[in-house]
Amino acid sequence: MTVRVHFYSYFKELTGCPSTEETVVEGATIDQLLGQLYGRFPKLTAMRNSTLIAVGVDYQGRSYVLKTGDEVSLFPPVQGG
Amino acid sequence: MTTELILTTDPIDEAALIARRRASAGMGAAISFSGIVRGKEGADAISAIDYEAFRPMVEHQFKLLFAEAGQRWPVVESIRLVHRVGVVKVGEPSLWVEVVTPHRSEAFAACQWLIDEMKRIVPIWKKPLL
């Protein structure tokens, strides 16, 4: 299945795009998705330990099991105010 | 409890916001906080900050925070929060928060907590401009 992944803040510079599509196996977790994305976008690996992850508009952990139609967002720590 | 969230590219008109304040007879405290763009980011002088927001998630996360604030401080009558997006020049407010309660202690506490949580979970980022 295919999931759309959005990048925010300087993650767009690290990947060179605001969003992408990634094909993952049925039952894949976010952790597996990240592994694939690190292969495509090696500069993202430097942010491995501080990447925040959302599916839709809610935060999710790396063990979240992806579903068809999920929109995943990856971004660095937030800085409002 | 009433809440209002405004994400805007327009300058924050604090006087107009205060003029629109509504507080019932039992309310005795209205705290408003303005976050202003500093002229320095670390050691570097800057001219402005460009704020980027993941708008649908910002709206959702603020809704959750407002609800939690209402549970933590049930006496809160209203919360209003305005956050700029886009380019905000040095010296201009990028954030305005108001909390209305019967007494000041809850207003200060709720306002502080809300801003702390915003900086932890609400997906807004800033890019300093030289």
Image (cartoon, coloured by chain):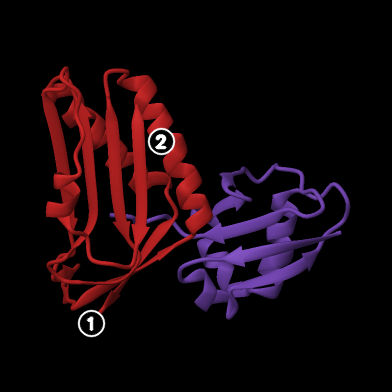
Kind of residue at badge 1: Leu
- Tell me which residue sits at (18%, 58%) in the image: B13
Task: Give the Cα separation between the discs numbered 2 and 1.
Answer: 33 Å
Mark count:
2
Q: Which percent across, then down, holds residue B89?
A: 20, 73
Q: Secondary structure at mark 1?
A: loop
Kind of residue at badge 2: Leu
Residue B81 relative to residue A56: left or right: left
User: Between disc 2 and disc 1, whose residue precedes?
Assistant: 2
> For residue B130, which numbered disc appears in the image?
1
Chain letter, colour purple = A
Closer to us: B95 or B45: B95
Chain B drawing hue: red
Q: Which percent across, then down, holds residue A45?
A: 58, 66
Write down the chain letter for disc 1.
B
Residue B127 relative to residue A60: left or right: left
Q: Which residue is mark 2?
A: B65
- Tell me which residue sits at (16%, 51%) in the image: B34
| Numbered disc in front, either 2 or 1 | 2
* Relative height, residue B7 to residue B108 (above, below): below
Say few, some or many: other residues with alpha carbon within 10 Å of mark 2 (under 14 / 14 to 19 / 20 or more): some
